[in-house]
Image (spheres, helix red, strand yellow):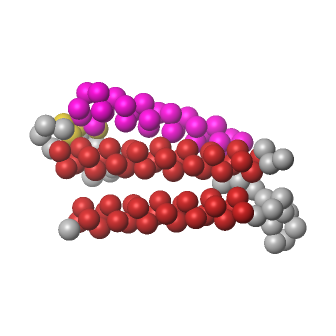
Amino acid sequence: MRNFVYYTLMLLLGYAWYRFGQNLLSKGYRDEKGELTQGIVGPVGFLMAAGVACYLFFAMLRALVRGEVPCVGKGCGGQVYALAAHASEYWANMFFLAWCVLALGYAMYVTLRIWFRA
């Protein structure tokens, strides 16, 4: 039951993140106050998001190839979950890594679309 709640909340958070980005894209060049519409991240945040997304994507690919993923979280520092021994924890961490990569990628996409409006 805990896994169901975890995956449901992550999907709901992803949907809320998607709707937030779509609301920013649907705005014009200026918002309600007359200021220019800002992206989700600024220039420095964009570079940091790109770096973190690339690192997490590499970690996800490495975990798929090796069949083991390091635990992502505070309560299990340094622990490694192998696909053969801990399948549930392995896929939960892989789902979290994939979610983070997609969320950061979407933030960068929305920001680029706002910056390069024609």
Left or right of 67 in this view: 52 = right
Q: Which residue is drawn at 62% across and 59% down?
A: 21
* Residue 63 versus residue 4 in the image, above or below: above
* Residue 84 versus residue 106 in the image, above or below: above
Q: Where is residue 108 in the image (x, y as percent from the top left)?
A: 62, 45
**Magenta region, residue range:** 41-69
Q: Can you name the residue that lies furthest to the left here?
A: 85
Q: Nearer the viewer, residue 49 or 3?
A: 3
Q: Where is residue 118 in the image (x, y as percent from the top left)?
A: 84, 47
Q: Where is residue 44 in the image (x, y as percent from the top left)?
A: 68, 41
Image quarter of residue 45: top right
Image quarter of residue 12: bottom left
Image quarter of residue 3: bottom left
Tell me the quadrant of the picture where the N terminus can be found.
bottom left
Q: Which residue is drawn at 45% across and 48% down?
A: 100
| Magenta stretch encompasses residue 61 | yes
Q: Can you name the residue that lies furthest to the bottom here?
A: 32
* Residue 52 versus residue 89 in the image, above or below: above
Please say whether residue 41 is visible from this viewpoint.
no
Secondary structure, magenta segment, majority class: helix
Left or right of 37 in this view: 96 = left
Q: Can you name the residue that lies furthest to the right here?
A: 34
Q: Residue at x 63, y 46 (%)?
A: 109
Q: Can you name the residue that lies furthest to the front here?
A: 118
Q: Residue at x 54, y 61 (%)?
A: 17
| Magenta stretch encompasses residue 98 | no
Q: Position of residue 95 (x, y in %)?
A: 34, 48
Please say whether residue 23 is visible from this viewpoint.
yes
Number of callouts: 0
